[in-house]
Image (cartoon, helix red, strand yellow):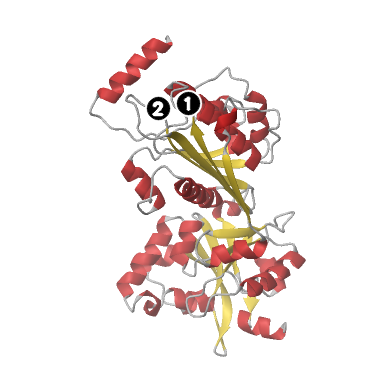
Amino acid sequence: MTDSLIRSLVEAIHSAPTQAVLYFSGGASQVSPFNQNAVVFQIHTHYLLLLLTHLLSLQIQALGWLASVPGASNTLLEVIVPYSRMSMIQLLGKVPGQFTSKETAEEMALVAYNRALKISKPGSPVVGVGFTGSLATTHPKLGDHRFYLSTRTSNRLWSSSVTLSKGLRSREQEERVSSQVLLKAIADACNVSSSTFVSDLTEHEAPAVREQCFDEDQELEQLIHGKICFKVFPFSSVFCRDTTSNWRKEGNSFWLIINIRSLCSDGYPCFELSAINADKPPLTVAQIKDRVKQFEKAGKTVIISNQPYFYKKAELFPGSAFVIGADTTARLINPKYYGGSYENMIETLLRCKVTGSTFLVGGRNMDGVFKVLDDFDIPDELKDMFISIPVDKFRMDISSTEIRKRQG
């Protein structure tokens, strides 16, 4: 099919009243003979990537270049195109000050980064990418032809804005040059050398670049204040299957998350600690770092999150088995933590159940009495979510608070 036939078909589609939601998966959106292949191949071998494109200028070329080179599944986690106004509002959770702006691109990159954290293997390097632009269209524009892009990694927020020379290029050519700049930004975020990759921007179209780097303390502050959803400290070199015995030996009551697949094959067991507590003040950065040290010494991966409630943890880590103590089980089924409503408790825990989450319950000493799962009246509709850890496999007669007191 010739380019003119494709264009005619697309114009006919655009003229129809039907609107579409598209999820890209599998094959390439466009196979390009352009010589980006070497850079793309390097990106595929370095990073997992979540790519969010922009509102007004769909980067089909950049997506095509990424998807058409073998190895795309190593890189692309998800592609979302918030093309309409309402789509962008729902993506960001608010109405942006301007839909085409550096701030919006940065907000998109942050949303993408958090999404990448949630759907990648814990500890894997990820990058979120946001792109928004206003390029040539079917009628002359009064304003500039411009685009903004941003990348967010664990320790860096990078953004760039470009104003194109008006009337110099067609829409397709503006798409091509903006895709080139986008691809180079992705390569840079992935620490892939792109020094030999030069875009078709003129010397009068030099990007205005801003970079902000974060140290670990700043990243944890962002987590405490809800800007990022969690941070992984991947200290494990080998992930042990016998997680409950390790948990017992270390005498540690932080939540151990075991992906439910670990019960069968290739799970990823790790600890999780929430910086926010339902009954206590938030942990400080110093307190978080102090608690992380014990996992580093033991060589155990730990995830620091900001979700104190299990229904929120279940949304962050769907399909996981949470190892908890009997004392936590008592709180988990206590209507007090659900506004005093038994019905709210049932509804909330059923939301956990829908995510595929389960709870492995170990016995604990509660007010001088050692209790196990069988000592609690679990509602019938929730019983299959709770699995008892045999006492001969795990027993702890001390609380995490007492452990910390003894450790000084």
Above or below, 182 relative to 210: above
The percent position of residue 14, horizontal first and vertical second, equals 29, 25
Q: Is residue 254 above or below residue 64?
A: below
290 relative to 180, above or below: below
Q: Secondary structure at mark 2?
A: loop
The answer to whether residue 143 is above or below residue 338 is above
Mark 1 = which residue? 174
- What is the number of the mark on residue 136? 2
Categorize mark 2 by other alpha carbons within 10 Å: few (<14), some (14-19), many (20+).
Answer: many
Q: Please state if 146 lies on the left or on the right of 323 as rendered.
A: left
Q: Nearer the viewer, residue 100 or 35?
A: 100
Q: Are marks 2 and 1 in contact (CB under 8 Å)?
A: yes
- Residue at 28 percent across and 19 percent down: it is 12
Q: Amino acid at mark 2?
A: Ala
Q: Position of residue 140 (x, y in %)?
A: 34, 26
- Three-letter amino acid code at disc 1? Glu
Q: Where is the C terminus found, in terms of image quarters?
A: bottom right
